[in-house]
Image: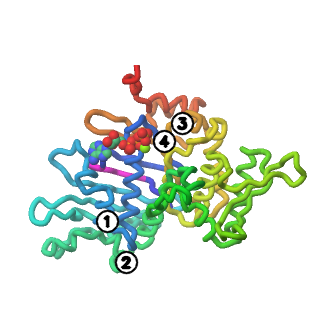
Amino acid sequence: MHISRLKLKNWRNFKSGEIRDLPDSVYILGPNAAGKSNLLDAVRFLRDVSKHRGGGLQDAIDRRGGVGKIRCLHARNDTEILIEADIVDEGGSLAWSYELGFNIPPKGKRDPQVTRERVTSFGPDGTPTVVIDRPGKEEQRDELLLRETHIEQISANAKFRELADFFSGATYVHLVPQLLKFGDQIGGRVIEDDPFGQEFMLRIARTLPRTRESRLKRIETALRTIVPHLEDLRFLKDEITGHPHLEIRFKHHRPRGARQREDQFSDGTLRIMSILWLLQERGSSPLLLEEPELSLNEEIVAQLPRIMASVKGKSRGGRQFIITTHSQALLSNSGIDPRGIVIITPSDDGSSMRGVSADEQAALGAGLSPAEAVLPNARKTGQLDFLL
Ligand SMILES: Nc1ncnc2c1ncn2[C@@H]1O[C@H](COP(=O)(O)OP(=O)(O)OP(=O)(O)O)[C@@H](O)[C@H]1O
Ligand SMILES: [Mg+2]
């Protein structure tokens, strides 16, 4: 399954915006502070709401510092915050539609309340069935009920558990190799869901051996196209401490080759390995990736879409990935599905989002890459003026 449409109202710096027909690989472009991470955060929010353990609406709002931080500063009369998402199945047919609106009630207690929650399921022939449509009459009498969504409650989401699981399984990653390598020494606190990748080794250790081996094999094959002298990628446990490690053997002038553990891997190698691992993790929930190009060589970045597609293609299910990027090299790949390109443009009245325009589509059709046809339009001219 994957997200095919996302609509936002008063979400962070988007007063309103909608993107449609998204495929399973999505690239979000835009200048600094355009709202790329904010767009990912809308999906993270649905994840946080849908988690029945340590989640829920109130918690998801609190974690972001309250409704005042989330609501678009450009909002005027209509102050409701709204997220809508459509989900398609593996065959590309619309399966679910979810709408969640919330706000601070105008009077009484100032706790955030659900202003609407609607779940629609679609049959094989596309017939819609409204599964829930809130608030109902009773809820208007007992406002406490509106403090919670139904998607966060196991007792209330039985008819759309698939949707709740889909959202709650979303993974957000902004991997920081130094935290992964030196987390123990730094004594870094691992925050929930581990977005910075500190527990990457534990994730690998917790995977069943057979699955682990086959995933590592795929990573090894993909890595070899980038690091040609790599010979063997293995998981092992330190004999003394019991800590999990990855080990790479490199072809070397010495007969047995040179072995390295993850704290000796280059930052780029570690980043790409963790991306390729996450892409193979089970489930069909989206993988939200911040700037996968960081610490990678341009030539490798240019191959990333192909490498990611090849690793994903071989694993069952295959997760949708939604990537934020500034990289010319990443977008120089002409294999990128243009429907997956989202351009965010800032303005004085909040940012807007769009797919590729007819002109850009024509340029892509004529053989230009997204880096040539779209990226120049996604850059804010004069962004560096303050440096001059
Ligand atoms: N509620 C809000 N209303 C208006 N603007 C907001 C709100 N919350 C955050 N912002 C602003 O949104 C802007 C965009 O932030 P975001 O982190 O999404 O940018 P980005 O495109 O990911 O940038 P970068 O490429 O630097 O990572 C920030 O300048 C932030 O101040
Ligand atoms: Mg960002």
Q: Name the residue under label 4.
A: 341
Pointer 3 and pointer 4: residues touching (CB < 8 Å)? no
Q: Which contiguous range is marked in magenta?
A: 5-11
- Nearest to viewer (mark 1 / mark 4): 1
Q: Does the magenta stretch include residue 7?
A: yes
Q: Residue at x 72, y 44 (%)?
A: 226
Give the Cα separation between the discs numbered 2 and 4: 35 Å
Q: Is the magenta stretch mostly helix, strand or loop?
A: strand
Task: Name the residue type under label 3.
Answer: Ser
Task: Name the residue type under label 2.
Answer: Ile
Q: In this view, does 136 lie above or below 45?
A: below
Task: Name the residue type under label 1.
Answer: Asp
Q: Which residue is drawn at 56% across and 37% down?
A: 331
Pointer 2 and pointer 4: residues touching (CB < 8 Å)? no
Q: Which of 178 and 277 is in front in this view?
A: 178
Q: Name the residue under label 3.
A: 327
Q: Name the residue under label 1.
A: 59
Q: Furthest-bottom residue in view?
A: 155
Circle nearer the N terminus (2, 4): 2
Q: Furthest-left residue in view?
A: 107
Q: Which of 87 and 210 is in front in this view?
A: 210
- Nearest to viewer (mark 2 / mark 4): 2
Give the Cα separation between the discs numbered 3 and 4: 13 Å
Circle nearer the N terminus (3, 1): 1
Residue 232, horizontal then vertical, whole percent: 78, 56
- Horizontally, is 74 left or right of 255 in the view? left
Residue 144, horizontal then vertical, whole percent: 19, 73
Task: Name the residue type under label 4.
Answer: Ile
Q: Mark 2 points at which residue?
A: 154
Q: How many marks?
A: 4
Circle nearer the N terminus (3, 4): 3
Confirm or reject: label 2 Cβ below 8 Å from ligand 1. Answer: no
